[in-house]
Amino acid sequence: KAGVTQTPRYLIKTRGQQVTLSCSPISGHRSVSWYQQTPGQGLQFLFEYFSETQRNKGNFPGRFSGRQFSNSRSEMNVSTLELGDSALYLCASSLLVEGPYEQYFGPGTRLTVT
Amino acid sequence: AQSVAQPEDQVNVAEGNPLTVKCTYSVSGNPYLFWYVQYPNRGLQFLLKYITGDNLVKGSYGFEAEFNKSQTSFHLKKPSALVSDSALYFCAVNYGNMLTFGGGTRLMVKP
């Protein structure tokens, strides 16, 4: 079974631009979560989607948004990029929503904002 | 609020020696605890989880973790370290399908 895939793997953007990252979950997985990883803040939860609905949201500004499609694929968008948005963005999928199921992570998208 | 702490930024062990990576947690209710490993330029890989039951949980690649409720700890262990175990290890608590991670511990296994 193919793992979680994320595209693109690397991205360089300029401050003020916007960016869209894509995530395809493991086949059959319906919950998709996004995390931001930085050296300073570590791994932080961004948001989680299930059945095209955002179920949970972390403590990030409104510039960070996401959506999920009917096939469970998900995208996240960051508008008006800031230098501090440079990070590894990780997508994770899990089989079910309720219960402590393990999440499976993709390789991440490395975003650099200049 | 749910939180986990990894008190050591780095752990150094010699190949063949046992290793321990420490994690303590603070949760309200039942703790759902996880260990993940991250290799360079890779995402996180699931190692093991504790939901309920036996306090010793066995996971992938020969790793195991011991849940201790009285000490609110969930330490990761392996009887004999390999050089290939060198990586970044994260402890996490799951609440409402949101993972809250510790700061990570870099494990260095030297030949």
Image (cartoon, coloured by chain):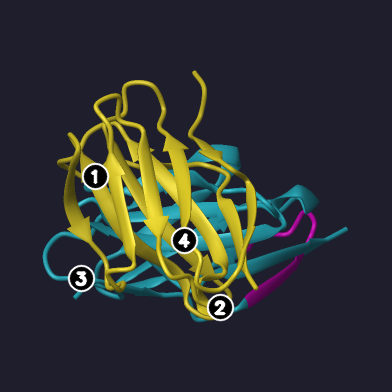
Chain colours: A yellow, B cyan
Near-viewer residue (B62 or A87)? A87
Q: Which residue is mark 2?
A: A83
Q: How many angstroms separate mark 4 from mark 1 (CA)?
A: 21 Å
Near-viewer residue (B58 or A96)? A96
Amino acid type indicated by mark 2: Leu
Amino acid type indicated by mark 3: Val
Q: Quadrant for the C terminus of chain B, please.
A: bottom right
Looking at the rendered structure, which numbered label has been put on residue A49?
1
- Determine which quarter of the picture holds residue A29: top left
Output the chain of dot 4: A
**Label 2 residue SS:** helix
Q: Which residue is mark 4?
A: A18
**Label 1 residue SS:** strand
Residue A91 pos. (x, y %): 43, 47
**Left or right: A26 in relation to A98:** right
Whether discs 3 and 4 lie on one chain: the answer is no
Of the residues under marks 4 and 1, which one precedes in the sequence? 4
Furthest-left residue in this view: B29
Q: How many angstroms separate mark 4 from mark 2 (CA)?
A: 12 Å
Amino acid type indicated by mark 1: Tyr
Residue B69 pos. (x, y %): 25, 67
User: Is label 3 or label 4 in front?
Assistant: 4
**Label 4 residue SS:** loop
Amino acid type indicated by mark 4: Gln
Residue A55 pos. (x, y %): 16, 50
